[in-house]
Amino acid sequence: MTETELLQVLARGEDSQHQFKRDFTNADALAAELAALANSRGGWLFVGIRDAGHATGLAQADIQRLNQLLSNAASQHVKPPISPTSQNIQTDNGLVMVVDVPEGLNKPYMDLQGRVWVKNGADKRHVTAREELQRMFQQSGLLHADQVPVPNAIASDIDERAFARYFERRYGQSVEQAGLPVTQLMENIDLAQQGHPNLAGLLLFGKHPQRRLHVCFIAAACFPGTQLSDSRYLDSENIEGPLEEQYQRGLAFIKRNLHHVQGNQSVNSLGLLEVPEEAFVELLVNALVHRDFFISATVRLFVFADRVEIISPGHLPDSLMPEQIRAGVSNRRNKVLAEHAAHILPYRGLGTGIPRALGAWPKIDLIDEREANQFRAVVWRPVAGQVTGQVTGQVTGQVTGQILRLLSVMDGEHSRTDLQSLLHLKHRDSFMHAYLQPAIQAGFIEMTIPDRPQSSKQRYRLTEQGKVVLDEQKNR
């Protein structure tokens, strides 16, 4: 670092990676600063600087004393020891020591009192929360959430038939041929410990995993607009069950709340999803397999009028960045879960999922929200005109025709079953996917009880916009 570069840093002020100190006389105080930087993303200590960013400078004797103090603090007062480097920069007011502290590979780093420090903005704080400590052990490879035995989980929590089907498909022999109890077989392949299922085993083969794993499900909601704060919603579901069921039902939730377009499909087909299904397959699997299980939060799935958001608890592991995963770089947080999920879900574990999703649909934002400790994948939907065309004036495509057919039978308020009967449609899912949901999202139909979409008393009626569209079609 040159003097010019130093002055530029001082002009910007302190932040989570740049800390200014007038001096250090105590090894414990210096160790706390070193540990905080090593436990976070690394950074620099500038010694010989007032908090305001003005260099007060150090004498040659001060530099010699600080070098000895730095050596003692880094090797004897931080556990495990770290290896910072230092550089002395000459300024008009004297020397400034710049201490470079790399991000640690063996987190968490502690002081002699066993305290763990992390950066908190330009300051530091003492970590006391168990979940945060667990995540730091996870980052260092000392603890893996998917291999932790689940409290109170027992052998009877496992669906032995589901496990037997998987075992035979994966390893080419039946459970009977293996000649061992299911719990022992699970332990042999890292899905249990001492007869108790771990998180991966319970999540993959549990009868009712959420009885023990209370936040390991998908919270899904579909909103009519573009804001999460909207009190109305078109559809909602807490998607529970084993991981494979969560994946299947999560994908079904997305598909039933998006438009379908005819494209080159036959007249009687359901049409093509407005965004290629493969994009959602990859993003949903990643959220389920790579989430941080040390965070007490659910995977969230939100469908808005302009986008779909899949939010996974936990930011990207280590120093992995969105640009890297776009290029196919991967870092598996839950290695045992990922290994077995690769034989159950459409997951390959080679870092190819995100590039494949982007290849199917480039309009995807990948946002690593480290402060919120979550990872957000935002899939932008086509604008309405690209999906349905202009319903008034240029009616094209299957979805538009189905909307018009639905509007034409509406007179007053109707239940869902009434509408299906009027249209002579037997299958609820087809009616919801191709008729009712697109009409509601387009603003042509509204619910009589919008804050309770699943109510047994729910009825549907034309909006003013829907009436205008229907009148224009009648007058054509």
Image (cartoon, grey):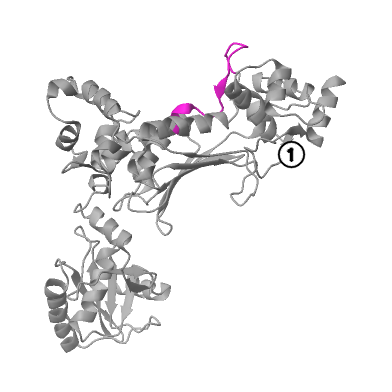
Visible in this render: residue 244?
Answer: yes
Q: Is residue 248 left or right of residue 175?
A: right
Quarter of the figure with residue 32 = bottom left
Q: As shown in the figure, which amino acid type bears the numbered disc 1?
A: Thr
Name the residue carrying label 1: 448
Q: How many marks?
A: 1
Q: Residue at 36% of width from left, 68% of height from top? A: 16
Is 215 drawn above or below residue 236 in the view shown? below
Quadrant location, the N terminus:
bottom left
Q: Is residue 406 left or right of residue 378?
A: right
Visible in this render: residue 331?
Answer: no
Quadrant location, the C terminus:
top right
Q: Is residue 235 left or right of residue 107?
A: right
Is 214 drawn above or below residue 338 in the view shown? below
Quarter of the figure with residue 414 = top right
Q: Is residue 301 left or right of residue 173?
A: right
Based on the picture, tell me whether residue 269 belongs to the magenta stretch.
yes
Based on the picture, tell me whether residue 27 belongs to the magenta stretch.
no
Main SS class of the magenta portion in the image: loop
Q: Residue at 70% of width from left, 18% of height from top? A: 421
Binning the other alpha carbons within 10 Å of mark 1 as few (below 14), some (14 to 19) or many (20 upward) gives some
Region in magenta: 263-280
Which percent across, then down, holds residue 214? 39, 47
Q: Nearer the viewer, residue 367 or 211?
A: 211
Quarter of the figure with residue 116 = bottom left
Question: Most extreme residue toward the front, as rendered?
Answer: 156
Which percent across, then down, holds residue 257? 58, 32
Which percent across, then down, holds residue 200? 27, 40
Q: Residue at 69% of width from left, 42% of height from top? A: 450
